[in-house]
Image (cartoon, rainbow, N blue to C red):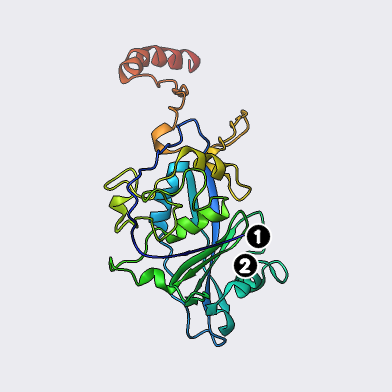
Amino acid sequence: MLSACSGGGGGDSTEATTVSTVTESDQQLVLEVQPIQVCDDDGLVCAQVELFETIADKIWDQANLDIAFLPLNQLNDSTYLTTDEDEFLDLSFSGAAGSFGRHPDSTSTTGPINLWFVDVIETSAGLVQFGNAWIGSNGVLISDDILDFNNGIGRLDVIAHEIGHNLGLRHSTLGAGAADNLLTGGGTRTIPESIDDIFPDGERLSQLNSQQIERVRESSFVQPSSTNQLAPAIEISESDSVVLSASNVPVATAQPLAVPEQSPSPLTWLLLLPLGQRVHRHFNR
């Protein structure tokens, strides 16, 4: 199912979301996202790209989920600079693995999530469309309109919002619907104008509740972060050579030095000289 996201910058709903953040015991998860810039056939005229990465990270930190944007791919095909629903279907699911700029490891239900930047998303109603996404399936579409917004920066939370659809969230289920909830539709969602208004700061916008967090963390698109894996213990045998930092180099055990025997002192020679002379005279008589 496709979720189309359009509408104004704020809403008249005053109902607040009941938020819930993960605890320290919850495992850190990661979601890889493959951004794809759509250009014309010659690769000269391209859609604008703005990831809003710090915004996405702050929003999804509520679920202890790190958004990892991969290096940008480029799709040179004028057909998709202006994309309708049928063309978005082609981009997301047609062709072989890696077609249309998709990540070669992506499937319809496993990541990385593929995110296309296009000039315009066409709609039958003629509305300004900021983004489209498949609910519970792989594919996000973002238009240049997210950068033409009244705060002079852009519609900051759209990419995070659309990613939420891929992770199984909708506009009006699991507690969404309040103006301060990330997944509420664009017509009634209050859009943060800076990172300082994103939960838990400022106006506490783009919130996620406990039901949404639970659903997201169960998604097949998210994976445990490599930082969760403890480094294996290292066993060192007597024959191993180990390089250590200066701060933890052990003090070597002191080895005894071989001290040479001392030669007789000059006084000793003076005392022995008369004896030597007598011995010499004895053997030469």
Q: Which mark is residue 106?
A: 1
One can see residue 225 in this view: no
The span from disc 1 to disc 2 (Cα, nearest Å) is 7 Å
The quadrant in which residue 86 appears is: bottom right
Helix, strand or loop under label 2: loop
Image position, residue 279 (x, y; %): 45, 13
Residue at (55% x, 45% y) in the render: 216
How crowded pointer 1 is (Cα within 10 Å; few <14, some 14-19, many 20+) is rated as: many
Image position, residue 103 (x, y; %): 62, 64
Disc 2: which residue = 102
Identify which amino acid the numbered label 2 is placed on. Arg
Marks 2 and 1: in contact by CB < 8 Å? yes
Q: Which mark is residue 153?
A: none
What is the residue that sits farthest to the bottom in this orientation? 42
Total labels: the figure holds: 2
Helix, strand or loop under label 1: loop
One can see residue 66 in this view: yes
Residue at (29% x, 59% y) in the render: 193
- In front of the other: 269 or 59: 59
Q: Is residue 116 above or below residue 259?
A: below
Identify which amino acid the numbered label 1 is placed on. Ser
Q: Is residue 16 above or below residue 171?
A: above
Image position, residue 271 (x, y; %): 33, 12
Q: Is residue 31 above or below residue 89?
A: above
- In front of the other: 65 or 240: 65
Whether residue 181 sits left or right of residue 167 in the image: it is: left
